[in-house]
Amino acid sequence: MNALRQSASDRAAYTLGGPQVAGPLAVFPVFGPKPRLDYRAFVRAAELGAFVKEVESGALVTRLSVQNPTDLPLLVYEGEEVLGAQQNRTFDVSALVPAGERILVPVSCVEQGRWDHTRHREAFRPSPQAADPSLRRTKRAAANAAGRVDQNEVWAEVSGRLADHGVCSHSEALSDLYDRRRGELDPLGRAIRHVDGQIGALACVSGQPVALDLVSRAEVLAALLPALAQGYALDALGGTEPEPDPRQAEYFLRSALTPPRRERRTVGLGRAFVLGTQAPIGAGLEHEGELIQLAAFPADGSRRPGPRVARPSQQRRS
């Protein structure tokens, strides 16, 4: 694989703002260079007719079809969740879908107990939440090591979260956890607001970085941030509340921007890459030398379990 490198001047163009804090959650806004490529977030493109559906020739757990009839490329973001059709999924990679085209994008199922053939032709709808950073890190670590996400590991992670939070879901859906805990998540998530010029978010839980989410356009980050913040908030439930550490956040940002990048197969426009070190773990997308997207997670993958409660019996798919 070819190595993709970012110059020191390019890295220096990214800076942190002051954190927004809500209990155990602190999110530092990231600012960066002016964008070149024009594109939309999927959630905005969906308002203009873009859609996600099951693969037409026969549904696949690990692939979805993204159709973009609009006049600009659209970005589906790693960790974004889509709801409906035969079962809920999250995107495994970020991908730029060209204007007027359709591509297949790798996904993972986050609803083990449902596979509804009667809804095969139904379009998915954008979810109000993204997967939490801990789950996204688990997926990314597997994909970087083996070239693909381990679906059984994803199901086990979702099942564990439901049990840890005392949520009974008949279809073992990650979305049910968010729905049942929305009253606790919203005060945290709504405290994280997009600010002018912000193109990224560096989320810390209990004083430790848990995720860096970066795109090249401020309006795209603004569209993504509410769902990402719900994921950050889920990781923060039950955490402690130390003072945010700007030096630690700065170090994590630089460590995510510094490593060499190994090129990977791309679906859609641009060049996909993974970070060439184990600290942090991450992947992203470039287009004609411009960093379009980057998601990075700490090498320490210990998951924040959230509140521990008595485990209800759960109805599983036979």
Image (spheres, helix red, strand yellow):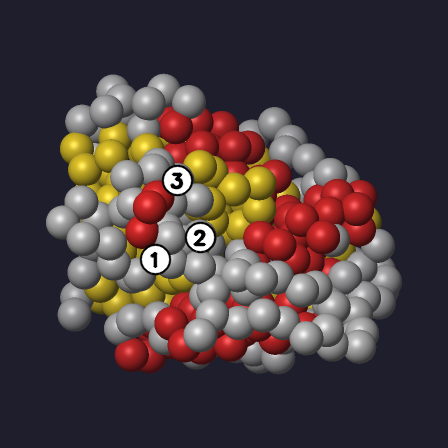
Residue 201 position, x and y percent, is 59, 47
Residue type beneath disc 3: Phe
Question: In this picture, is 3 found above or below 220?
Answer: below
According to the picture, the residue beneath numbered tag 1 turns out to be: 107
Residue 104 shown left or right of residue 278 in the figure: left
According to the picture, the residue beneath numbered tag 3 turns out to be: 124
Quarter of the rendering occupied by the N terminus: bottom left
Q: Residues within 10 Å of mark 3 (few under 14, many from 20)?
A: many
Using the numbered discs, state the Cα–Cα distance from disc 3 to disc 2 in whole angstroms. 8 Å
Check disc 1 and report its element: helix, strand or loop.
Answer: strand
The dot on residue 180 is none
Check disc 3 and report its element: helix, strand or loop.
Answer: loop
Question: Which is more foreground, mark 1 or mark 3?
Answer: 3
Q: Are marks 3 and 2 in contact (CB under 8 Å)?
A: no
Q: Viewer-proximal residue, 8 or 190?
A: 190
Q: Residue at x 21, y 28 (%)?
A: 99
According to the picture, the residue beneath numbered tag 2 turns out to be: 88
Q: Viewer-proximal residue, 293 or 227?
A: 227
Residue 111 position, x and y percent, is 48, 60
